[in-house]
Amino acid sequence: MLGRSRVGWDFFAWLLLVASLVTITLFALTAGRYTVPIGHIVSILLSPIHPGAHDWTPDEQIVVETVRLPRIVIAGLVGAGLALCGSVLQGLFRNPLVGPQTIGASSGAALGGVTAILFFGFGPAVQLGAFLGAGTALASVLALQRSDGQSPLLTLVLAGVVVSAFCSAIVGLATFVADPDTELPGIVFWLLGSFAAADWHRVLLVAVFCLGGGAVLIGMRWRVNVLSLGDEEARLLGLNPAKDRLILLAAICIIVSAQVAVSGTIGWIGLIVPNLARFVMGADHRKLLPFAAVMGAVFMILADTLARSLTPAEIPVGIITAIVGTPVFAYLLRNAIVGGR
């Protein structure tokens, strides 16, 4: 009876989440200075499979197909990827206060991107720099972790903190020496996170890496369940914890670097969304990871829509996620302190 009730709850939760995704996507397509009726949006979206008489203007089609739709797709992919990364990391570390920033990948990608901007300006070099920065940061964290095999998880966290602090310091130095008239405004806006430069080329870039890395994480979701029990238990069940952890961290690095390359640094999604998803679906990563991915997409699309609609000038989306994420993190931290007494 209890199992049937659980299945019913899961079905209801998925139904509500999918309905939220459709509703918020349509809302995001209508929101903006150039108003497009929702009927025209639906007709434009369905036109490839249901051609007929056009009741929309060419400008409306351009706004939907080349401006808002790629932006929404990128936001959804980025949100899903970050939520997946946070869910896996929290399972590996058995700590709900861990996010993608913990392993230093976000800070490393930011450092690589800023360095590329300083030397080559905005362009493809930024994406390459973000990948190289994230990979170097993760390699540094893993190298530091190997120096102490007694408590690998704790050492990994501490190594991530050290690498993140170093990368943040270099990013601060780079912004200090940047030209205040030409380079600094763009660097600051990029570091705060934005989807303003979204186009179909960037959609392809982030889709390849987020979907590839996400497939690895979801494919190993039952291994995350085992690893969350501890290394000793994982070995008893026939797993190689070090090897599995390395594969998972590499996939997370790929997703985070792709996210930073196309939208700058965006925090908090990988921290708060997994906790919200766990509250609904429980701690079983076989169910948690797909649910968290869709919830992350919904959250990021909504945050980006608010960022470009609340004021005449676009607000960096990283500010919106920080405003929402900070009180949620404070609530989780207080619960962790109370629970640890």
Image (cartoon, rainbow, N blue to C red):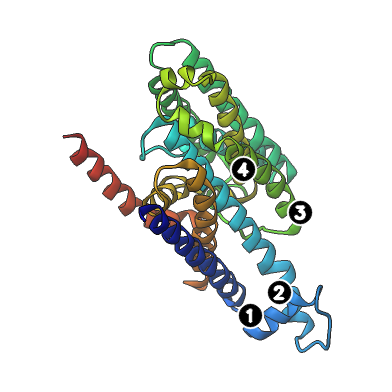
Residue 257 placement, left or right of 192: right
In terms of depth relative to the viewer, which is nearer, 197 or 274? Answer: 274
Q: Say which of marks 4 and 3 sits in front.
A: 4
In terms of depth relative to the viewer, which is nearer, 50 or 114? Answer: 50
Q: Secondary structure at mark 2?
A: helix
Residue 180 placement, left or right of 47: left
Of the residues shown, which amino acid type is indicated by label 1? Tyr
Q: Residue 151 appears at what percent x and percent y?
A: 38, 16
Q: Quadrant of residue 60?
A: bottom right
Residue at mark 4: 214
Q: CA distance from mark 3 to mark 1?
A: 23 Å
**Vertical placement of 260 versus 246: above or below?**
below
Mark 3 is surrounded, within 10 Å at the Cα level, by few (under 14), some (14 to 19) or many (20 or more) other residues, namely few
Q: Say which of marks 3 and 1 sits in front.
A: 3
Q: Quadrant of the C terminus?
A: top left
**Nearer the N terminus, badge 4 or badge 3?**
3
Residue at mark 2: 63
**Nearer the N terminus, badge 2 or badge 3?**
2
Residue at mark 1: 34
Q: Secondary structure at mark 1?
A: loop
Q: Say which of marks 2 and 4 sits in front.
A: 4
Of the residues shown, which amino acid type is indicated by label 3? His
Residue at mark 3: 201
